[in-house]
Amino acid sequence: MPPQINPVLILGAGINGAALARELLLNHIPVVLVDHADIASGTTSWSTRLIHGGLRYLEHGETSLVYESLAERERFLRNSPEHVAPLELMIPVKSQFAGLVSSAAGFFNLPIFQSGNPSRGSWAIRSGLTMYDFLAGSQQLGKHKRLSSQRWKPIGFDPSFMDVFSYYDGQIEFPELYVSTLIRDAETIAQQNSVRFTLRTYRRPKPNGEHFEFENLLDFDSPTDPITPSALVNASGPAGDETLEQLGIPSNRLFGGTRGSHLISHKPVLVEKLGRTGIYAEAFDGRPVFILPWNGGALIGTTDLRHDGDPEVATATPEEIDYLLRCVNSVLPDVELKHEDITQHYSGVRPLPFVPEGSTASIPRGHWLHTHEGTPWPCYTIVGGKLTTCRSLAEHSAETILKQLGQKQVANSQDRKTYEGEKPQISPGGRARFVLQHLTGVAPEADTKTAAAASIEKLNAKTMADVIERRLMLVFDPTLSVAHLEAVADALIEAGKLSADARQTTIDQYIQRMDTRFGKQVLPA
């Protein structure tokens, strides 16, 4: 690496920022990755946790995005089997011919022929799945099929459904831990290539001419040196416009995110009906709903509502919770899902481009690197993006940045594995501890304090939320108790991340956070 190249400064340590950091480091470009909170604490943590081609994107003519996503789905399955596993999805349908003309009109961008009826019948679904299989090519997962009634009728679909198809996509149970894996891989690459890689969490960048200084947002963090970047990348997701405003970079509005809320249930009858197979169905109003086996329970989502507030405090509203309950019961009426069956909920904002009007479903789901003019350094903002395409987005973005810096691309991550050896066999509910062992060496049966200490020492965790929500994944454990919080607090104290005097206050505040943000009750010790 030529010595005159300063680090690229990436603002936002979510899945896109971390993937881009890794891609640049592979090409011997130094990186400073900064976030005002924890890694993966934004949109990355609030998704439906699928690695998929985007079947419904075909209706809006986004064929190239589906093709790209399917190629990336296969790379995820091949390169990171500790994180991503195949998931069979059933699509029940209510008629033969509904939606066929409208779907074709959307695919060919002929709005005059599109119908206001969102329903999709067997022919429309079969056509879409056939195109999906074609775009996927000869890959790891099997082609779609029509299920026999003996297979699907015992599940208890609403009588309005007359036929069921199935196909495969991928599921990433914990994208939060995948970001930790990307960070670990970036550290390894930097060491191998003798290139600087610095991760700074809980820091707020302060521009000063061509330089950046960093405000510490946690009392125990040490001061950091200022840097003069060779380029700046705004990868802060749906808060991207606010980031530009804080940095004093003029720009038209780029983001118009939509809120997606999810429910988690451990109701036995629902978990039993799903087994290892998910459902992708039309709900009572024709909108699609996912009902997925996930982490020993069921994950239900999602809504798609325009969101203009602070994305960091997005919460599932009572109306959204009622809506999702009604969706499930319109698909599986025998389950009789009620409020008391919901273990918790979560909600986040998608980093979609700003589209002032129209349905949220029609907002483009692609991604691009927006270039800003008139800045002291090359400056870019990542617009859009989703879990599935984080690697390809990073590769394409790195190409642009390398060209601007006058450097040639010498490597990419297309075949870079995060896991070697045979495909792991992971039991439902056991993936978080499996990945934690892979990253830190701590045994799956280790007690909470030991596991917390490992995540603090080796995975950059600094707060109780970092440990519980994005390392140990205890936030999704229905048995989360005060004893867990006490063990994490003690690990933070021993690591110098929390004062002993603040122990009880921190625990009390976190119990309140669980209630307000997740609708979750922490059990007594």
Image: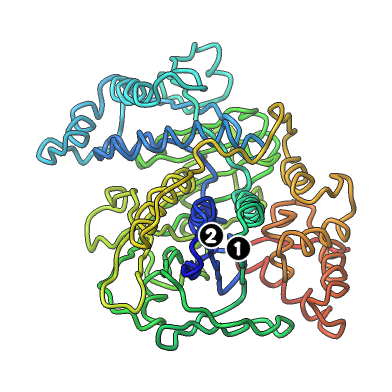
Q: What x and y, as percent, mark residue 305?
A: 38, 58
Residue type at the position of mark 1: Ile
Q: Is residue 11 visible?
A: no
Q: What x and y, as percent, mark residue 445?
A: 88, 45
Marks 2/1 in contact by CB < 8 Å: the verdict is: yes
Q: Residue tagged by mark 1?
A: 39
In this view of the protein, which residue sits in the foreground, 505 or 416? 416
Which label's residue is closer to the chain start, 2 or 1?
2
Q: What x and y, as percent, mark residue 281?
A: 44, 33
Give me the residue at 72% from left, 30% from top. Answer: 424
Total marks drawn? 2
Give me the residue at 48% from left, 46% from top. Answer: 391
Left or right of 403 on screen, residue 168: right
The secondary structure type at the circle numbered 2 is loop
Q: Mark 2: give few (<14), some (14-19) or many (20+) Cα within 10 Å.
A: many
Left or right of 474 on screen, residue 174: left
* Distance CA(mark 2)–CA(mark 1): 6 Å
The secondary structure type at the circle numbered 1 is loop
Give me the residue at 49% from left, 47% from top. Answer: 387
The quarter of the image holding the C terminus is bottom right
Q: Is residue 108 visible?
A: yes
Disc ID at residue 14: 2
Left or right of 158 on screen, residue 335: right
Tell me where residue 101 sits by quadrant.
top left
